């Protein structure tokens, strides 16, 4: 949809957090939004981000944002709540992002075309009074998202403008050439199935002279594995490992019927070597029953 002045949005809030579902936190945020703006729709992207894991939250928001309706994107992964970080709302070509200025919002904002205005959420009339400063998702972010989504307030009503260049970025690891038709890559994300996403794309493998159906060398710690580049999990037998292009367009490692993260003992932030193998046979990784 076209947002025009961007002060009129679709009446939808897409909500992501690390709150989980054991406690009442997600429901309370929904409740605040419903009381402030009862006609606004809330879509839950996920609340299963590891507690305080800003990088994981930023990556999830970036993967999801292109599939969400234009509107308001409310993201709360906030280990610095109550500290010096700003609470912000940011205007972009697809709507508004609301959350902490700790790098959580930055990659998604860049993906949708950048921002032309950001404000610090300081206007008390758009906040819930609270004796504590540990639940800004309820007290600050939810009311701001609700009034933006409903059109009850413009972003400039919520607080003073902040310097866009001073917003906290999220620094993502970059793959590095490692010689001999190989690159040193990093694990960006491990999903709930144990699939391991690297910070390289299919084009990077192609630039190394590899194509679907080829074996790919994956070096983890001191072990080097030859793993088929398949088009899907079904390209290999049950229990075998496969390199594939995932739904985000990134190179990923999976084990059909198992967990690549468990079987290869690898997690977010770990470094791997990826490239053309020099010799040897493809290994078979058996999933743990």
Image: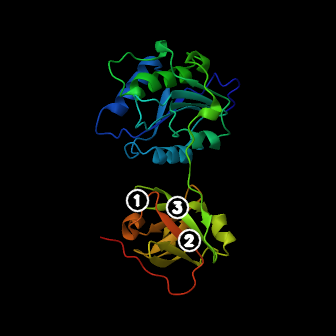
Q: CA distance from mark 2 to mark 1?
A: 22 Å
Could you give the CA–CA distance between mark 1 and mark 3, rounded to whole angstroms? 19 Å
Q: For this view, does 264 lie left or right of residue 246?
A: left
Q: Residues within 10 Å of mark 3 (few under 14, many from 20)?
A: many
SS under mark 2: strand
Indicate the secondary structure of the residue bearing disc 3. Answer: strand
Looking at the image, is mark 1 or mark 3 earlier in the sequence? 3
Camera-side mark, 1 or 3: 3
Secondary element under disc 1, as helix, strand or loop, is loop
Q: Quadrant of residue 83?
A: top left
Per the image, the residue denoted by label 3 is: 186
Q: In the image, which disc is placed on residue 274?
A: 2
The reply, left or right, for residue 134 in relation to residue 33 is: left
Closer to the eye: label 2 or 1: 2
Residue 193 image label: 1
**Which residue sits at x=67%, y=70%?**
206
Tell me if mark 1 has few (under 14), some (14-19) or many (20+) residues whose alpha carbon lies within 10 angstroms of its own.
some
Q: Does the image show residue 240?
A: yes
């Amino acid at each position: 949809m076209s947002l025009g002045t961007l002060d009129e949005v679709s009446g939808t809030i897409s909500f992501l957090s690390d709150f989980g579902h054991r406690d009442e936190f997600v429901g309370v945020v929904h409740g605040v939004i419903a009381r402030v703006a009862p006609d606004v729709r809330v879509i839950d992207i996920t609340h299963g981000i590891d507690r305080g894991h800003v990088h994981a939250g930023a990556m999830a928001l970036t993967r999801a944002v292109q599939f969400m309706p234009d509107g308001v994107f409310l993201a709360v992964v906030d280990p610095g709540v109550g500290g010096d970080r700003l609470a912000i709302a940011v205007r972009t070509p697809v709507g508004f992002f609301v959350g902490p200025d700790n790098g959580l919002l930055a990659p998604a904002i860049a993906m949708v075309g950048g921002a032309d205005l950001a404000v610090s959420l300081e206007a008390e009339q758009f906040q819930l009074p609270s004796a504590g400063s540990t639940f800004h998702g309820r007290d600050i972010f939810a009311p701001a998202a609700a009034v933006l989504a409903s059109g009850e307030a413009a972003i400039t009503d919520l607080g003073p403008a902040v310097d866009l260049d001073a917003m906290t970025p999220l620094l993502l690891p970059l793959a590095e050439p490692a010689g001999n038709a190989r690159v040193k890559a990093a694990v960006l994300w491990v999903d709930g199935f144990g699939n391991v996403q690297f910070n390289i794309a299919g084009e990077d493998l192609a630039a190394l002279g590899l194509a679907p159906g080829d074996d790919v060398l994956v070096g983890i710690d001191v072990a080097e594995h030859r793993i088929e580049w398949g088009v899907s999990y079904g390209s290999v037998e049950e229990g075998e490992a496969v390199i594939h292009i995932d739904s985000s367009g990134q190179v990923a490692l999976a084990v059909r019927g198992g967990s690549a993260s468990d079987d290869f003992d690898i997690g977010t932030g770990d470094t791997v070597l990826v490239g053309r193998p020099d010799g040897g046979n493809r290994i078979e990784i058996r999933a743990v029953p």
